[in-house]
């Protein structure tokens, strides 16, 4: 059975991947908005998801100083997530849970990037009224 990511407010999971204040956990150190327990503030969901991927893969040397012991714990315990229902608060949006699925080889990074792109393109700003544009010309 494949690993799934669910919103804990809508469906009960078997493993929480949320951030915690203490101890080892699967939470993302990259966060949006206000978080008392995140480590690195970012401006977009894309940055948070890609940051988590690069942090776990070790592909960004700037991230090497971010919680190295917890990073290693996640990598050491990753296989234990296979087939579990991972609960966080992001679903149905793309999140670090999907990165865990990538690292398990169940989906591709391209799948996650496509999900992010689809979410980013949901909002279409209204066209400016021509009379309004003339006011500022």
Image (cartoon, grey):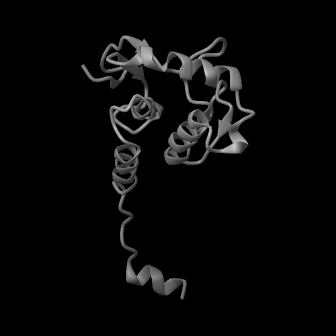
In the visual, does 25 lie left or right of 61? left
The quarter of the displayed image where residue 13 is located: top left
In the visual, does 94 lie left or right of 48? left
Does residue 126 lie above or below 58 as drawn?
below
Q: Residue lying farthest left?
A: 1
Quadrant location of the C terminus in the rendered image: bottom right
Q: Position of residue 45 (x, y in %)?
A: 50, 44
Does residue 89 lie above or below 119 as drawn?
above
Q: Position of residue 87 (x, y in %)?
A: 40, 20
Q: Which residue: 69% across, 20% down? A: 69
Look at the image and tell me whether residue 115 can be seen: yes
Does residue 102 lie above or below 114 as drawn?
above
Q: Position of residue 62 (x, y in %)?
A: 72, 43
Is residue 59 or residue 49 the one in the foreground? 59
Is residue 36 or residue 118 the one in the foreground? 118
Q: How many numbered circles are shown? A: 0
């Amino acid at each position: 059975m494949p690993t799934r990511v669910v919103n804990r407010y809508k469906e009960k999971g078997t493993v929480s991947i949320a951030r915690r204040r203490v101890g080892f956990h699967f939470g993302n150190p990259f966060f949006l908005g206000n978080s008392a327990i995140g480590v690195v503030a970012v401006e977009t969901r894309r940055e948070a998801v890609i940051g988590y991927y690069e942090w776990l893969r070790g592909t960004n040397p700037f991230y090497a100083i971010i919680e190295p012991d917890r990073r290693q714990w996640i990598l050491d315990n990753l296989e234990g997530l296979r087939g579990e229902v991972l609960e966080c608060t992001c679903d149905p949006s793309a999140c670090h849970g999907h990165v865990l699925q990538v690292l398990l080889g169940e989906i591709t990074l391209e799948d996650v990037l496509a999900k992010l792109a689809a979410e980013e393109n949901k909002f279409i700003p209204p066209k400016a009224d021509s009379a309004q544009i003339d006011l500022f010309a």
